[in-house]
Image: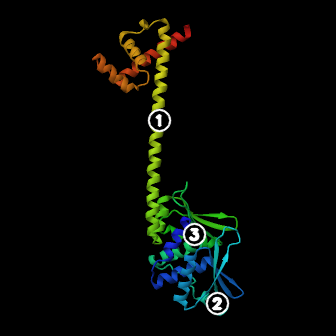
Amino acid sequence: MSFTATVKNEVSKLEINEVEKIAELSAIFSNGAIVENDNIKITTENASVSRRIFSLIKDIYKIIPNIIVRRSLNFNKKYMYILHIKSKNIDILDKIPKDYIIDDDESIRAYLRGVFLMSGSINDPKTSRYHLEFLVNDEEYAFFLNGLLNKYNLNSKVLKRETKYMIYIKEAEKISDFLRIINAYNAVMYYEDIRIYRDHKNMTNRLNNCEQANVDKIIETANKQIKDIEIINKVGLDLLDEKERIVALYRLKYKDVSLLELSEIISIETGNKITKSGLYHRFKKISELADKLKEKL
């Protein structure tokens, strides 16, 4: 089962009050009702959503829709649930509020839940990208819906996609906020668990990459210092003063350690403290001498 279906199954079972039922059904009709020959048809691939719509229509309008179950035509073995309301009941469309049910926070949340049931989809947070979208037919309605979402600072955007309009959210935290808005609390817990795990894993990977980069830099620096010392050694390390010669000999002995580690080793073994900065300046002089010798050799 997809994560979208899981969320829809959860919110389809919510207990809600009369005002919320009207707001939710208003969104369902706005996003899923098709009028054909004075009949209303609402189609969904989700059995829980079909039962939800059936109950809402029955509770609000005291009408029993017919439900037709058909196998999907795209060979994916899914079933289509078609709710059919006969022509004598067509006047229920006129009872849907023209300006939508968005007078208060409770109604807006219920309306957004209804929109999600009919036209929403959400990626499983285990996938490579976070994505929530709604696909609608009308541009004006798309921007109306975008405005509702952004009342909650969800940073949603509208994109034209062929003949439809997509309202989408990409930020993980904002998608989690949306799930809270529609009261999909089980989905929120699952989503947050996966999101936190992914964020932790990404941070660990970044730290590992950073550590590997540091190791690579240490090795590269050490190899450069060894090459400089080997060039000087062709003539003789006596060209170096005593402090530089000690540093050179210790580098040849400890080829893979960092400057900090080498400074600590030299300080302990010689009894003469030398800092990482002091070590750097001595290797700089060694490098300058090696460059001069390369020109002559």
**Residue that appears at 66% across and 90% down:** 86
- Give the labeled residue for mark 3: 120
Q: Where is residue 256 in the image (x, y as percent from the top left)?
A: 43, 24
Furthest residue to the front?
77
In this view, 60 is above or below 294: below
Give the distance between the C-alpha atoms of the residues marked 2 and 1, in whole angstroms.
Answer: 68 Å
Using the rendered image of the protein, determine whether residue 123 is visible from the camera's viewpoint. Answer: yes
- Residue closest to the eye, 232 or 195: 195
**Residue that appears at 37% across and 13% down:** 246
- Mark 1 and mark 2 in contact (Cβ < 8 Å)? no
Q: Where is residue 197 in the image (x, y as percent from the top left)?
A: 44, 54
- Residue closest to the eye, 99 or 260: 260
- Give the labeled residue for mark 2: 90
Element carrying mark 2:
helix
In this view, 22 is above or below 1: below
Q: Which numbered circle lies on residue 212? A: 1
Q: Nearer the viewer, mark 2 or mark 1?
A: 1
